[in-house]
Image (cartoon, rainbow, N blue to C red):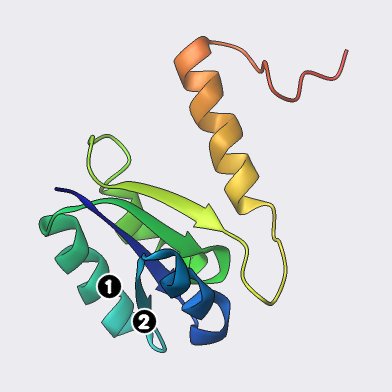
């Protein structure tokens, strides 16, 4: 059975534990890189990651963009929404469908 993980600063992710998700507070970049690799090799099918952490781990995240597992989904943290998560969804939909069907401003 696959699992779901949440990575980011403690204050942004601790609430997800009440939903039964595995939370992994990350307070430094080296730990974040090692943790992402470990979770990807384990049975985690979905990894939610705060946008702030993802901005530091872009190079590592790119390694998982073309594979089925894990799906890395960006979420806003307590510091606010940077728009990176919705931009990622928009890009994925454009690649899958061939056009912008979500935010088409006609």
Q: Which mark is residue 33?
A: 1
Q: With 9 as the anchor, is 79 left or right in this view? A: right
Q: Kindly check if marks 2 and 1 are in contact, taking CB atoms under 8 A apart as contact.
A: yes
Q: Position of residue 90 (x, y in %)?
A: 60, 31
Q: Tell me the residue at 49%/80% (across/down).
A: 14
Q: Tell me the residue at 56%/63% (across/down).
A: 51
Q: Residues within 10 Å of mark 1 (few under 14, many from 20)?
A: some
Image quadrant occupied by the C terminus: top right
Q: Which mark is residue 29?
A: 2
Q: Tell me the residue at 19%/57% (across/down).
A: 40
Q: Position of residue 84 (x, y in %)?
A: 61, 52
Tell me the distance, in whole angstroms, between the alpha carbons under discs 2 and 1: 6 Å
Q: Position of residue 97 (x, y in %)?
A: 51, 11
Report helix, strand or loop for mark 1. Answer: helix
Q: With 71 as the anchor, is 96 left or right in this view? A: right
Q: Quadrant of residue 96?
A: top left
Q: With 25 as the anchor, is 94 left or right in this view? A: right
């Amino acid at each position: 059975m696959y699992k779901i993980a949440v990575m980011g600063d403690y204050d942004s992710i601790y609430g997800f534990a009440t939903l039964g998700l595995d939370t992994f507070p990350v307070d430094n970049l080296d730990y974040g890189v090692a943790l992402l690799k470990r979770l990807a090799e384990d049975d985690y099918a979905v990894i939610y990651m705060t946008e702030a952490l993802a901005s530091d781990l872009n190079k590592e995240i790119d390694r998982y963009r073309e594979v089925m597992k894990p799906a890395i989904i960006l979420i806003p943290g307590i510091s606010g929404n940077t728009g990176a998560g919705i931009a990622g969804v928009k890009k994925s939909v454009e690649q899958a469908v061939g056009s912008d069907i979500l935010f088409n401003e006609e």
